[in-house]
Image (tube, rainbow, N blue to C red):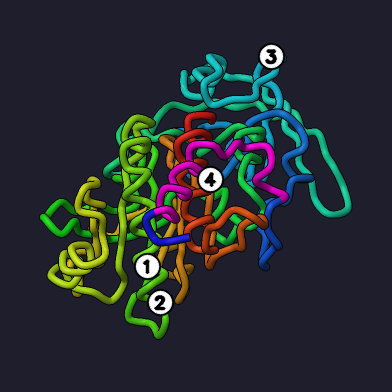
Amino acid sequence: MDASNAWRAAAALAAALTLAPLAACAPLPAPIQVPPESLASLGLYVAYNNHFPECVEGCDELRAGDIITKIDGRPVRSRHDRALTRLIDGVPSELTVLRRSRSSEQVLEVTFTATPSESLPGVAHAPPLWIVGAEALDLAPLWARRQLYAHASPAIALNHVDGPHVDGRSLVGRPRMLVMCQPTRRGRERECAEAMRVVQIGMERLGRAGVDVLFNLVGYNDTDRRDFQREHGRPELPLVPMYGAPTLVRDPVQVLGVEGSTRYETYIYDSLTIVLLDAGGIVRWHSSGVVPPPEGRGLSATQFTTATAVAFACDALRRA
């Protein structure tokens, strides 16, 4: 298959992939975060607990990994459920919480009272808990459940080649696709170019789905990034938004995240890294490296991995 047909095949794959077979299509790297058995019950998965002072009751009894199955006796399963307003209205609510460990399962009854907080600069009316539907979270294939999966947006500092700055908190509010690749590593330039072209093919569809793209060629300066896209990109397709980490960050505020001092960079490896966040700031996909496609696809592992992530971003991130 020549390069042109390969890109068309990648686009067709991104359009045709369904969510059901994703988890079974590739071998599993280690470590895997939040295995399916931890998400077997319907409810709201607690990704992070801010322990804000505005949470006057109940926060100390909840921890990451808990699943809220009921609010005031009403089953809940999605972040879109109207019952969630009871978690921030300042009125006590009764939560039924499932807590699993390797050896046990507990059902807790927790009285919860909280209001939104303004103590997380960059996030207006921050919730006391960062949550996502367990069913939606479980859509990710197992090979896309690396260390950042199921966490709230960590800290990062990125600048667009044309100026705008983003940090981990400013990523909250819209679904995002972060692609990080190091073309300076031996043999990685082709991988980065293939990934970029597949993202180019998916840009229109990602835009329709409301997904913002941040593509970071790690180790390049802005001129290098522009040159790389001009040399390896498809001129008839939309440009991929290029970002890079600033060489010097004088103000710690520029690298703010939602979840403590955790940083994205800690988990960026020397191979292709893709992170997908939903609008609620939850990491729904974290893959590192590439996985081989099923036989007969006519795609490279890089094309297949990137196209699968594009399809997931368009189809799954809206579910919360």
**Is 165 placed left or right of 162 in the picture?**
right
Q: Which percent across, then down, holds residue 258?
A: 40, 49
Q: Is residue 174 visible?
A: no
Q: Residue at x 61, y 45 (%)?
A: 140
Please name the residue that numbered disc 3 is placed on. Answer: 74
Q: Nearer the viewer, mark 4 or mark 3?
A: 4
Residues under numbered marks 2 and 1 in contact, where contact means CB atoms less than 8 Å apart: yes
Camera-nearest label, 4 or 1: 1
What segment is highlighted magenta in the picture? 5-24
Q: Amino acid at mark 2?
A: Arg
Give the mark, 2 or 4, whose residue is nearer the N terminus: 2
Q: Which residue in the protein does label 2 denote?
A: 188
| Circle 1 residue | 192
Give the total number of marks visible in the rendering: 4
The amino acid beneath tag 4 is Arg
The amino acid at mark 3 is Arg
